[in-house]
Image (spheres, rainbow, N blue to C red):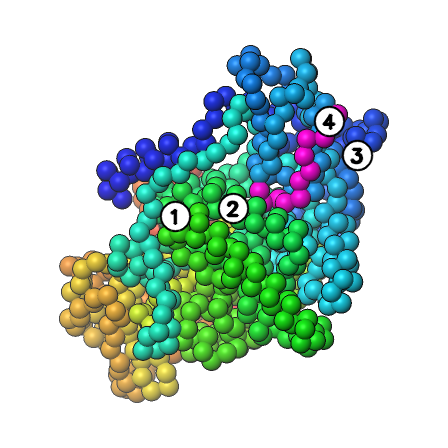
Amino acid sequence: MSRPVSLLILFVITCALPSRAQNLLLVKDWFFAKGDAIRSKSLQWMPAQVPGTVHTDLFRNKKIADPYYGNVEKSLQWIENETWSYRNYFSLPSSLISSDSLFIEFEGLDTYASVYLNGLLLLRADNMFKNWEAEIRRKLVKGKNELVVVFSPSAVEAKRLKKQAEQLTGAVYPESERVFVRKAQYQFGWDWGPRYVSCGIWKNVSIHSKKSATTSLLPRRNVLLKTGEDAWGSSFYFTENGKPVYVRGANWIPADHFAPRARRLKLYDSLLLAAKEAGINMLRVWGGGIYEDDAFYDLCDKYEIMVWQDFMFAGALYPGDAAFLENVEAEVRYQVNRLKHHPSIVIWCGNNEIEEAWFNWGWQKQYNYSGADSMRLWSDYKKIFHEMIPGILAELDPQRPYWPSSPSLGWGREEAYRKGDVHYWGVWWGKEPIEQYREKTGRFVSEYGMQGMPSLKSIRQFADASQLDTSSRVMKAHQKHPFGWENIGLYIRERYREPRNFSDLVYTSQLMQAEAIKTAIESHRRRKPFNMGTLFWQWNDCWPVTSWSAVDYFGRKKALFYEVKRSFADVSIIPHADSSYYYISIVSEKDSVLHGRLFTDFIAFNRKERNVLRSGEDISVGSSAAFTARSIRDMKREFPFDGCMRVRFVVNDSTLAENFLFLAPPKKLNLAKPKITVQISGTNIILESDVFAYGVEVDVPDDVKLDDNYFHLLPGEKKTVKFYSKRPSAELLKLLKTKSLADTY
Ligand code: BMA
């Protein structure tokens, strides 16, 4: 970003802050108790955190076990059925005493809450996703004021509403009661998260002398969405300042199941820094989570990461009665006004997977909908996503693009790969082989994913030694996909040899996950401009779990993280093969055409030298992928050994991109056991191996940060990994361990 633009942004951000004359932040000295404080005077009060949640408050007061440890989820379900009260005593500062009007603002209440000031009802809240404000001047007393917030159980109310709606309409609503309450949907359990339906004052509370208002006049990024008929079908791509942008990114879920804790633990800082490091230029805030914390958008603005913002609706049908619509309208207005000044946001999207579900998930048959039911449910859908939301956006944020539902078409349909965005889940959900990523590319792939286990260190943080087995109670509790373990086993068996033990399984599952997503990303990138974007599922976790994430809940990076970092580089060289030919594509996101040389080496697995296949040939790379094709038979004639090919794109003597081609899955490679030696010099770890070493993991203590990991080592070539650590080199050298795929045989 050039200097004048950053200064301008700084200036405008300052102008866009809510204009409040005086402000009293009420986030200290809160207490909470089980029960309704208005009805009962004998509650047992305990210290609480605001912003916070009842689960984290109970845990801090040692009333419950750590909700993330072991297998406690079931035993904590009682919490969602209770009423909880929060209480605070405050006095007005002299600066506010003389104000004619005073407002209290809750930036977020989760969810059904009644707020009382000095025993008088101030407001009743029923939506987690909007602020709640009330005038309080006349209700204040001299000296100490008592503020009480009573939360009634959301799940109980939602179940009542579901029953009522189903009786009234005679049709069953797919999914749990979650759709009837405007509350983060993942709290009711997801295929990567537990069911903890929480409550609490989850954002700041303050008293101020003016009603809150945001004046937003920020420069936006000039990003447009281009959709429309083209030679292949219908396009879906973004342009910035008129130039097409190839999107490299991931899907984002809440960074902590107990959302306000994400900020306390500084998870936004670490996760978004990691995203920047990996070369991510877009994150999709997925619709089953939350409209994110300000910290998230501020960091995306800073790192120039584009944000695809879903509205918070996911994979279900939502009610269409007047009260619900009114509630949603207030939420959408609030969030659009709250977020629209962030230049990072480049697209609003109505929901996650509702259109895909409606047309492909078989609800009509499963719930036996009559023609009239279907018409009504679909018309309720259209009221929110085709009328209300775009209507509000046209008024409040007319320039940003709106896309009603992601994806536009289900992955089972052929035209999904020619039109709009697609979530390709044939690999994983459909159990199709990883190679299918090469066929099912699509114009913009906004979801696809493969699970990998979190590192052993992370597993040890939620499971004791007796549980280190995929069939143990704890490992099962921390795998939320119905056939998650089965699929991990399936994909490992398809491509890798059986791991010897649990720790090898962890390692192999990560290599497999990384290999899968690399295959997908490369297949997408080399088909540019047919394909113009790739968002894998998923960047992060909300608790410690086996999932599709690249970075686990504790911030440890899986092999996938490093593979993504390599695959998302601005310049990428991508070899792939069919049965007769191999192809080498080079893609570049650089502005100018690159003139360089392509080098190809052959590396036999059991030898100490490599053989030069081609000594370098000139190649120029512009904005579309450049590629060459060659015969595999010729290559095999020249090199009749077990081995792989390394390709490099070299410009002015520096290697801009490097990659490997294997003609068989890893389990068929006759890898020799390598001897890896390690040296440390300054801030570099230098590794060397006597023979080709596949997928070398460098294991270091948590405080040591590495810029690369899970890479291949070539005989006779030194590999330098930059590291950051305060430890003396000799100590680090002692603690550092390496492992490669052949070590697991
Ligand atoms: C996607 C998402 C999530 C889910 C993921 C993995 O389609 O939208 O609903 O967690 O699949 O199954």
The residue drawn where x is 36% and y is 70% is: 228
Q: Where is mark 1, residue-wise?
A: 344
Determine which of the numbered discs, if any, sits on residue 36 in the image: 3
Question: Of label 3 and label 2, which has the lower sequence position?
Answer: 3
Q: Is residue 633 left or right of residue 539?
A: left
Instruction: Give me the C-alpha separation between circle 4 and circle 3.
Output: 14 Å
Q: Where is mark 2, residue-wise?
A: 333
**Crowd class of label 1 (few under 14; some 14 to 19; many from 20; radius 10 Å):** many
Q: Is residue 679 left or right of residue 269?
A: left
Find numbered disc 1 in the image and state the secondary structure of the residue it sits on. loop
Question: Of label 4 and label 2, which has the lower sequence position?
Answer: 4
Where is residue 712, by image quadrant? bottom left
Instruction: Give me the C-alpha separation between circle 1 and circle 2.
Output: 19 Å
Q: Where is mark 4, residue-wise?
A: 120
Above or below for 214 versus 311: above
The residue drawn where x is 51% and y is 55% is: 389
**Crowd class of label 4 (few under 14; some 14 to 19; many from 20; radius 10 Å):** few
